[in-house]
Amino acid sequence: MSTIAVVLSVLLALVFLAAGAGKFSGSELAKGTPEHLGISPSFYKLGGVLELLAALGLVLAALGVVPELLGALAAFGLGGLMLGAVALHQRAGDSFAPGKENPSPSAPALILLIISLVTGALILS
């Protein structure tokens, strides 16, 4: 795996470790987001579990513990999750920029979608 793929894998893993753990934190954001997006809290937590598992896959692949293909699949899986997140945010009426009427913008999910796909492609190259 190239150095850039390892760096992106580790950065993505850190972001999604935080995001996945945040879905279980019990904070107001973790409580309000599923309602805002029109999904159940259990579905929201399932997304968190998938984020944590994918982050683990990225780290293990970057360390060479598991095949690189698993890391690429984890990155592409995160891309799929982020595609779903963008769709949910758009359905909820969120724009890409934060604001008083838009506390939950979809731009971070779109950016992470792109980074995830690029990381997966770099891992495979």
Image: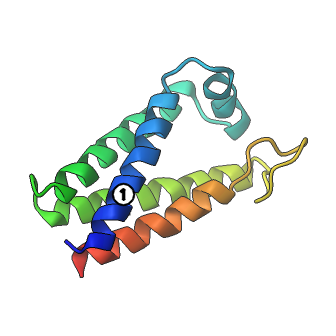
Quadrant position of the N terminus in the picture: bottom left
* Residue 69: image location, x then y, percent: 17, 66
Residue 70 occupies which quadrant of the picture? bottom left
- Tell me the element at label 1: helix
Q: Residue furthest right?
A: 100
The total number of labels drawn is 1
Residue at (58%, 29%) from the top-left corner? 40
Q: Amino acid at mark 1?
A: Gly
Q: Is residue 113 above or below residue 91?
A: below
Residue at (72%, 56%) from the top-left corner? 90
Q: Residue furthest bottom?
A: 125
- Residue on which the image places disc 1: 77
Q: Is residue 56 above or below residue 5?
A: above
Between residue 11 and residue 28, name the one nearer to us. 11
Residue 108 falls left or right of residue 120: right
* Residue 87: image location, x then y, percent: 63, 57
Residue at (21%, 58%) from the top-left corner? 62
* Residue 101: image location, x then y, percent: 90, 43
For mark 1, does the 10 Å Cα neighbourhood hold few (<14), some (14 to 19), or many (20 or more) residues? Answer: some
Residue 61 falls left or right of residue 13: left
Residue 110 falls left or right of residue 93: left
Between residue 7 and residue 118, name the one nearer to us. 7
